[in-house]
Amino acid sequence: MAQSFEINGCDTLAKLWRKACRERGSGIAHREKKLGIWQSYSWQDWFDGARAIGLGLMELGLERGQVVSILSEDRLEWLHADLGIVAAGGISNGIYTTDSASQLAFLVEDSESVFLLVENDEQLDKFLAEREAMPGLKKVIVFERKGLRDFSDPQVMFLDELMALGRAAADGERRFDQRIDAGSGDEIRMLIYTSGTTGVPKGAMISHRNVLFMLDRGDRVLEVQPGDEQLCFLPLSHILERLISVEMPIYKGVRVNFAESPETVFDNLREISPHAFTAVPRLWEKLYSAISDQRREATAIGRFAFDRALRAGHDFQAAESPGLSLRLRHALWDLLVLKNLRDLIGMRRVRRATTGAAPIAPELIRWFNALGVPLYEGYGMTETTGIISVNTPEKSQIGSVGAPLPDTEVRIADDGEILVRGPHVFEGYWKRPEHTAEDLRDGWLHTGDRGRLDQGMLTITGRIKDIIITAGGKNIAPAEIESRLKFSPYIADAVVIGDKRKYLTCLIMIDRDNVETWAQRHQVPFSDFRSLCRAEAVQDLVGGVVEAVNREFAQAEQIKYFRLIDVMLSADDEELTATMKLKRTQVENKYSDLIDSMY
């Protein structure tokens, strides 16, 4: 058994959470919008709600070590259910709302979930459509009654009924505390299913010990302060959002604000103006695109001021020891332009911004730094409880993913694969010892990523399985080419093709909003997304981006032809992960005819 790990005398997250709730009491833990108004909820509210849910599940028969799945968008009830499950000795398993009914059935059965909590009638319909494929479920609990007033099913109940059952439980407070006290650090805190980009999704078992170690070491490199405001908007089924919106707030007393929906993230960002903000590259790309588009729409004087301000920001950031003249020039342009731009995107108070979960163009990091938004790239996996390495204010190198966490080890295997060892490495895959044995060997996690270490800083060069070997024998990592393409405000995503072929080609997904705006401004006629993609002017626009990127690479690494994916993809499509990354294998299979047309 691995060595135990404690924070504030607590060896499980449930014990740390109970201690935090008791100490912070009426202090604000969460905010959520109701009818357009931000409502506040205390730590005591969190404890009371989670206890009612946990006791309700115990009354229904939840036993220690059993799995309970949650299918919901980010909201207060998600966190209440999550900690209620864990405090009652269960294992919490989040499921993406974009998953289909058949995917839900697979995840529920694979995880051996005994209960399923769903958000609303839309998510309940997925269960009803595949009920027979989930025979192990004892009960389904629905958060919202809207649209289900006359609904009745013996296997389905509503959250308020579950909580009433918990509140009425005999000797409930003592029994709930006993469940928390009986927990140990080597127990599984949660299952996080991998995205399935390289096969069937696997449930990574994250222990309480993994989480507590990550909280302690993570806080050492990326400072979090009590009372910080932050925005919860990535799916809580994702390890990164769970870490920053559930685990870290428990440890540090951060106030979590729930975005109303994925569509309102930018509005909510401006309203909250968080002190720390973590997002996937796609969001940073969209922020960059929005500001770049506004610059193009500005007057000549406005564009001049924007360019001068950004140049001052670049010069200031690049200087190791800026002189008085540069400091004054930067201060002037910051006052006149940059400060207003940070206000515009909700970054007025941000001390530290972080990006991860996918590659990001180094130019994008430099651009945000020049704007006055300190953006740092990190690297992690579900299997490492979210973080392997990260750039910090004290030690940063653009283009790298930073230094490994303190008290962890990273080394590069002979074939270039990144290997990781430390207390943050997961306990293995649920019910899949053969896959665990493949990825965990002699205590080292084999990440599947290629990289290099240079003076303690880690750089990712691509996925081992994604390395392209052309017909001419040239080894090419597509990730860097793809990230350069995505730096353009007109390109949302790209997949470089060329394995065992004579030359490289590329499938490109355009940024709909920016390209539509460009087309309207240049009087390019189109009727829908498909006709927009097929417009000759749009093809030329994207072709210009490809040509510019090609000039940055050697001839064998240049893209000879490209095709636009003329279907608007979303996370509901199997070609995209929940964090909006194209799944290379699925895309190559689905668009094989389009690819063949380039050869």
Image (cartoon, rainbow, N blue to C red):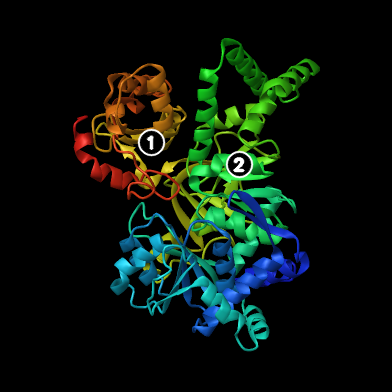
Q: Residue furthest right?
A: 324
The image quadrant of residue 167 is bottom right
Placement of 397 over or under 78, stated as above or below = above
Which residue appears at 51% of the width and 78% of the height? 65
Q: Can residue 455 be seen at all in this image of the molecule? A: no
Residue 302: x, y in percent? 60, 15
> Which of 402 and 50 lies nearest the eye of the viewer?
50
Residue 242: x, y in percent? 56, 57
The image quadrant of residue 148 is bottom left
Q: Which residue is mark 1?
A: 478
* Relative horizontal placement of residue 7, taking residue 589 as reference (left or right): right
Task: Return the disc, 1 or 2, that comes first in the chain's sequence.
Answer: 2
Which residue appears at 53% of the width and 43% of the height? 264
Give the structural element (helix, strand or loop) at label 1. helix
Q: Can residue 395 be seen at all in this image of the molecule? A: yes
Residue 202: x, y in percent? 40, 62
Amino acid at the residue labelled 2: Leu
Residue 526: x, y in percent? 30, 25
C-alpha distance separating marks 1 and 2? 32 Å
> Which of 421 and 542 lies nearest the eye of the viewer?
542
Quadrant into which the C terminus falls: top left
* Relative horizontal placement of residue 528, taking residue 227 as reference (left or right): left
Give the structural element (helix, strand or loop) at label 2. helix
- Looking at the rendered image, the disc whose residue lies closer to the viewer, 1 or 2, is 2
The image quadrant of residue 273 is top right
Q: Which residue is mark 2?
A: 269
* Relative horizontal placement of residue 151, taking residue 410 as reference (left or right): left
Within 10 Å of disc 1 (Cα), the crowding (few <14, some 14-19, many 20+) is many
Quadrant into which the N terminus falls: bottom right
Residues marked 1 and 2 touching at CB (< 8 Å): no
Which residue appears at 64% of the width and 42% of the height? 271
> Which of 397 and 227 lies nearest the eye of the viewer?
227
